[in-house]
Image: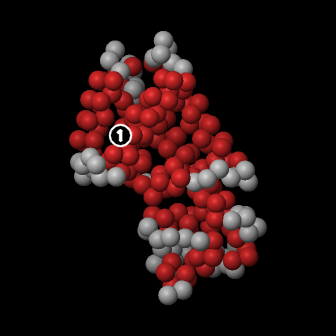
Amino acid sequence: MSPADSTSNVTSKRYHHGDLRTALIETARALLAAEQPFSLRAVAAAVGVSPAATYRHFSDRSGLEAAIAAQGYAELHDQLEAASKEITTATELWRLAVAYAHWAVANHTIFHLMCTAQFNPEAPEKTTTVAAIVDFLQEQLARWYPEQAGEAFFTGVWALTHGLTMLYLENKLDISDMAALEKRIQDVWATMFPV
């Protein structure tokens, strides 16, 4: 089976004109969501352009992966910002951890890529989106935990949140009940960060 055959069910849209970079990213994301491996050649075939056309936007697969990761971080940031609007006390900061876990579960293939994509100096948007999400989370911790706020506290909160999320993604904890996931995170948060 050719790359074009294996990707034909992922996207029915063919690229004709316009924003090729966006089309390549969207198609690669669709391949990831379908849990199909992708290469620049397979993505080009699915979009309907020559493999050479992809190199105008991405020098290699890692550049495309970095662009997808940047989108993922931006979307996760949006979810965390929305969750932050529901927080009225420090005891509710667990809502950020739940939002993180929910987004990761709903977008597990993109989340995995975000966690594994190598640094690519040709993809500054990933660096920018990661910095924005880190700044936002540090601001939230400084607001609700001003005495503890600092690099060590931030790292600990991130490790706890990410670790719980990975336990769900790796099926070490039951992922089938999202209400139970939320309750567990809330209980862990209350135990680790009593107010």
Q: At x 46% / y 41%, what residue is drawn?
A: 79
148 left or right, relative to 22: left
The mark total stands at 1
Rendered position, 188 above or below 27: above
| Circle 1 residue | 164
Q: Is residue 32 in view from this perspective?
A: yes
Query: Label 1 amino acid?
Result: Leu
Q: Residue 19 versus residue 193: which sits nearer the camera?
A: 193
Q: At x 76% / y 67%, what residue is drawn?
A: 56
- Colour setting: secondary structure
138 left or right, relative to 164: right
**Residue 21 on image: x %, y %:** 68, 64
Mark 1 element type? helix
Q: At x 51% / y 49%, what residue is drawn?
A: 115
Q: At x 37% / y 32%, what residue is drawn?
A: 95
Q: Residue 83 versus residue 185: which sits nearer the camera?
A: 185
**Residue 163 on image: x %, y %:** 39, 40
Query: Tag 1: Cα neighbours inside 10 Å, few (<14), some, or many (≥20)?
Result: many
29 left or right, relative to 89: right
Q: Is residue 102 in view from this perspective?
A: no
- Residue that extends furthest to the top in the rendered view of this protein: 147
Quadrant assignment, res 26: bottom right
**Residue 101 on image: x %, y %:** 38, 43
**Residue 126 on image: x %, y %:** 64, 47
Q: Quadrant location of the C terminus?
A: top left
- Residue that extends furthest to the right in the rendered view of this protein: 56
Rendered position, 115 above or below 99: below
